[in-house]
Image (cartoon, helix red, strand yellow):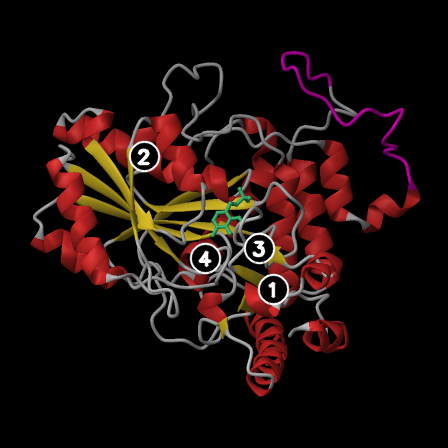
Amino acid sequence: MKYWRKLDQSDIRKRVFEALNENVNFYTEAIVGVPASHLDSKVFFSDASFLKDAPFLSSLIHNPNHIGCHTLGKSESFFSGTQEIERDLIAICAHDILRGEGEFDGYVASGGTEANMQAAWIFRNYFMQEMGLNADEIALLASSDGHYSMAKACNVLGLNLYSVQVDDDQRSLQKVDLDRAIAQLKSDGNKAVIVVVNMMTTMFGSVDQPSVYIEALKSADLPFKIHVDGAYGGFFYPFSGEKNIPDFSIPEITSVTLDAHKMVQAPYGTGMFIIRKGWMNYAATKEASYVEGEDSTLIGSRSGANAVAIWMILSTYGPYAWREKIFVLQKRTDWLEQQLKEKRIAYFRQPSSNIITIRAGHVPHELAEKFVMVPDNHHAPKWFKIVVMEHVSIERLIPVVEGLV
Ligand SMILES: Cc1ncc(COP(=O)(O)O)c(C=O)c1O
């Protein structure tokens, strides 16, 4: 671990308050040129005594705007303190979680949807600028279990979406269907491909093998770039004990989405986009001339408190306690899996994951409603999932198991 350290609460507090002190202070300074201020003081009091022990809430009321990308060099100087925390966070994720060597850029996005879209935007612009392609000559390829944000990204960016079928029991990419999709996209006039590899899908927790795409696209002689959607699995699967993690140790993987507002239990608005150095410029908006350092992100203004929240959580645990946290969730999921086996319930579980997805025939309607088991499709459910989160204890799983038929 190069960057990720477990810190005690007093060190975490000190670091965040020092960062806030380095930022401009709307409460005490004459900052007159920006349409920004601290949170409304009639509603959010800055003098509440507990705030001195509450670095995240203090960050919220101080209201730093992290507009732009802060790993690129020049950034807005007003919020340099909390931007430094964001840079540390990107380094922890790129190197210590995703095993990257070399340099990386990234930022805290609104969520997985934005981070996936940021990747598609960068690679689309790369193929357009470097190969002279039109957007409608670029395909986005993902598995049929991939998140719907790929469809959104294609709609917004004018890309062509191609879906690869997965095996119904194993949820793994069907090689034959991948070959079919590649032949199809080629014959439709696509000349380059953006691949989205899943590191734990939304419904099944399934993980794609990047080599399947890499081999197929190389033998089809098509230029491609690979993004990993780790919105769900990015903070889980690297700690699962499994061997084949789709991360930056694979040279063909250029960018990754992580979502701290899922497994990290950070507040919403804590997606993360991480990419190898040298790529963010394909999303640079030169017209953002009033922003110091300009802007290479989709979002524009965003709260610096979100970066602080993720950094605080990761620093509270450190890498070893984080592993333990994931281990406990896996053990509870092992318990659940064992119960399902004993009851002869048909299910899918990616080895070591904390999602179990059950064939709908075993799940009475009232049970699904009572325990908010999410279906793959609300109109015609074929599967329902159980996600073993921190609050999903074995005590809470027992009545669910008892209700399965
Ligand atoms: C695998 C995956 N990708 C992307 C997303 C989108 O994330 P968000 O809702 O944060 O935009 C999700 C959300 O569930 C997801 O599970």
Q: What main secondary structure does the magenta stretch of the protein show?
A: loop
Whichever of callouts 2 and 4 sits on the residue coming sooner in the sequence is 2
Residue extending farthest bottom: 342
- SS state under label 4: loop
As drawn, is 319 to the left or to the right of 27?
left
Mark whose residue sits in front, 3 or 1:
3
Q: Secondary structure at mark 1?
A: strand
Q: Which mark is residue 375?
A: 3
Q: Tell me if I can see residue 219 in this picture.
A: yes
Q: Amino acid at mark 2?
A: Ile
Disc 1 crowd, CA 10 A, few/some/many (<14, 14-19, 20+): some
Q: Nearer the viewer, mark 2 or mark 1?
A: 1
Query: In percent of the image, x 40 and y 60: which residue is there?
Result: 98
Does ligand 1 reach within 8 Å of label 1's beta carbon?
Answer: no
Vertical comparison of 232 with 141: above or below: below
- Residue at (15, 56) in percent of width and height: 216
Q: Nearer the viewer, residue 291 or 350?
A: 350
Q: Mark 3 or mark 4, which is nearer to you?
A: 3
- Say few, some or many: other residues with alpha carbon within 10 Å of mark 2 (under 14 / 14 to 19 / 20 or more): many
Disc sitting over residue 201 in the figure: 4
342 or 323, nearer to the observer: 342
Q: Which residue is mark 1?
A: 387
The C terminus sits in image quarter: bottom right
Q: Position of residue 353 (x, y in %)?
A: 50, 71
- Kindly tell me whether mark 4's CB lies below 8 Å from ligand 1: yes
Mark 2 touching mark 1, by CB under 8 A? no
Q: Which residue is mark 2?
A: 122
Residue 60 location, quadrant: top right
Q: What distance separates the C-alpha of mark 2 from that of mark 1?
A: 32 Å
